[in-house]
Amino acid sequence: MKKRLFGASAGIIAVILVFGLVSFLLTPYAKTYSAEHVSQSKKQIALTFDDGPGKHTQQLLDGLRERNIKASFFLMGSKVEKRPEIVKTMHDDGHLIGCHTWSHISFFEHTDEEIAEEIDRTNKLIESITGEYPRFLRPPYGYYTGAMLNKIDSIAILWSASPRDWVHIDEEYIYSWFLDHARDGDIILLHDTKDATVPAVLRAIDTLTEQGFEFVRVDELLCRNGDKLAPGLAYRFCPYDSRAWYI
């Protein structure tokens, strides 16, 4: 009995190790900028919002416009279809608009053809509203492969930190998280579909602006030293340390 259990456990461990190795080999280098690489003359943060547009997105856009703030939005095609007027406003206000697939599919659970179709369908819908075909992609769950990024000719944007607003749904928690964790160079993952996120973010913007922070589009943050972003790569920004996304 013990031998059978040991054999089963060894088999499970082997599968996990093989899957991890395959994932590593399939994943392109995630371009990471260190604090030493980036000028410290400004304290800049890129706010990025996934899964919209939703019922709170217009409130967020109004608040950002009042503060003259630009953000980055990674949209789902199925939701763009329901709120095209918000996407038009988003574009007219100068925000970055990227793709988050049509239905939030995992790249590890679907074929390349299915993924490419979801992305292209979403991008074409956004293009019909804004006149621009999105260059940027936020892979759902942060999963991606180098082969897929090259095939769809997209620039993948990851993140360096998040308050996990899909778990922590309290406004005070999210607001306090910003004050405790915000650092120069952060790409922060958020969701404008969550009730507490928008009011918490707007409050945090006001407080952090008083502390000298500037909020910019993610492409501006990543290119502020003159770098050029290339399709087929995934980019993130880890200021000062290698903090994980789940902080």
Image (cartoon, helix red, strand yellow):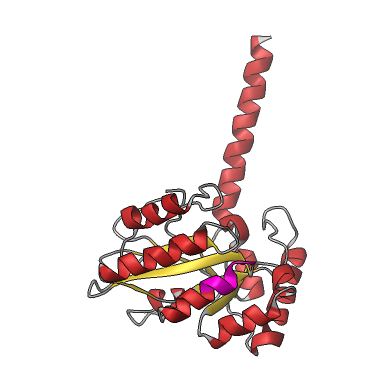
Q: Position of residue 118 (x, y in %)?
A: 74, 69
Q: Nearer the viewer, residue 156 or 63?
A: 63
Vertical placement of 75 versus 227: above or below?
Answer: above
- Magenta residues, start to end: 55-60
Residue at 31% x, 61% y is 183
Q: Position of residue 149 (x, y in %)?
A: 61, 69
Q: Is residue 18 left or right of residue 201?
A: right
Residue at 72% x, 63% y is 103
Q: Quadrant of the rendered structure where residue 12 is?
A: top right
Q: Position of residue 97 (x, y in %)?
A: 57, 77
Residue at 70% x, 74% y is 80
Vertical placement of 177 versus 220: above or below?
Answer: above
Q: Quadrant of the rendered structure where residue 114 is?
A: bottom right
Q: Position of residue 10 (x, y in %)?
A: 61, 25
Quadrant that contains the N terminus: top right
Q: In the current view of this chain or complex, which residue is farthest to the top? A: 1
